Amino acid sequence: MQVLVVGAGVVGLGIARAVARAGHEVIVAEAESGIGTVTSSRHSEVIHAGLYYPTDSLRARHCPRSRRMLYAYCATRGVPHRKTGKLVVATNDVELNKLGEIYKQAQINGCENLALIDVAAVKKLEPEVFCVGAMNSPETGIIDSHRYMLALHGEIEDHGGAVALNTRIERLVKTPAGWEVHFGAGETIVVDAVINAAGLGAQKLARATEGYPQERVPKLALAKGNYFAYTGRPVFKRLIYPTPVPGGLGTHVVLDLAGRMRFGPDVEWIERENYDVDPRRGDVFYASIRKYWPGLPDNSLVPDYAGIRPKISGPGEPARDFIIDTPKDHGVARLVMLFGIESPGLTASLSIGEEVAGALD
């Protein structure tokens, strides 16, 4: 079977790898000039443990399982990564109660080696942190997402697949011969199956897919996440997260494999794609960070970069789960649509890939 995967972000590449390993001929079409240049290169590069996600959600099902797969994949494929661990900190009694709820949910989700710890234990691990209690998640880590995507790309090619860059899909039409794929300048090909993993462009492609029920296309809500870099020497060895806020996980401490420390992302609802970081947002960052790190020096943060979450729920609305819409769900043969694959999409990419590959059969 010849399969077209639209989107060469980390999820699209993870799906293409699984499809190629299942013995199918795979083409990955990417509109940009490189793999993973949009959402997949503009995030925290965190390997998530799977703490927060509601029972039986796709996030809860895929994240812990895929996290174990991802650590094994990194070890065997030489992808740089580090199991740093993470503290989720509570700075008042309300947050402490919320932390207890997160701990219970994380246990339901099958997360290993978690512990609720007191202030004294926190100070031994991270002396600079202020809190009234914390949860220690030693299975959380960081990854070089670019090297990971290059490894996926290489494995796709090892199994006979190909990635076509600068290839924008304009329309998909179901015909008796298969899926007719329309590119620019009137060019077309016919494939047996299509997987829409286009991220921020998934809704647009779904609306240009003849035969796909249009009422199943969710809205796209753009939630920008800004990051600020710390100009001093890193003071933390682990990732430090506050308790979650509406729309995201809060402004947390992000470490990378090069030793840099930065903070983000916040949640900024926007109408159109824009990756500029407004330096004025730093004022809010200082206030948020000082709740758990009172020692943050003045004038120590500089704008770094921004990413955009492809959310399918807007401000003030309940968070929605990933959508993986398969032929079993929508009734159109050999077509899979993915919407709202944001965090923990990188961590969940290997498990999602296996599920989508299985859905084609």
Image (spheres, rainbow, N blue to C red):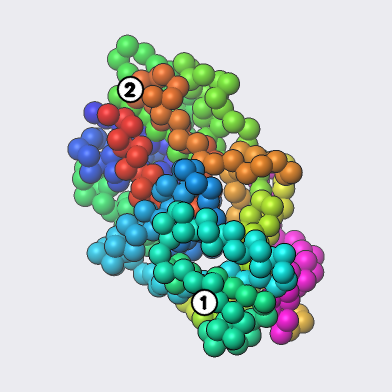
Q: Judge whether residue 239 can be spotted in this image.
A: no
Query: Dot 2, how many residues are within 10 Å of its Cα: few (below 14), some (14-19), or many (20+)?
Result: some
> Which corner quadrant holds the N terminus?
top left
| Residue at position x 48%, y 20% in the image | 212
User: Amino acid type of disc 1?
Assistant: Arg
- In the picture of the structure, the residue carrying the numbered disc 1 is 238
| Residue at position x 68%, y 80% in the image | 130
Give the left or right position of residue 52, taking residue 78 as reference. right
Element class at badge 1: loop
Where 182 falls versus 258 (above or below)?
Answer: above
Q: Which residues make up the magenta segment?
A: 272-296
Query: Dot 1, how many residues are within 10 Å of its Cα: few (below 14), some (14-19), or many (20+)?
Result: many
Q: Position of residue 217 (x, y in %)?
A: 56, 27
Out of 288 and 308, give the one closest to the viewer.
288
Element class at badge 2: strand
User: Amino acid type of disc 2?
Assistant: Val
Q: Quadrant of residue 306?
A: bottom right
Give the left or right position of residue 340, taking residue 14 as reference. right
Q: Position of residue 79 (x, y in %)?
A: 33, 66
- In the picture of the structure, the residue carrying the numbered disc 2 is 190
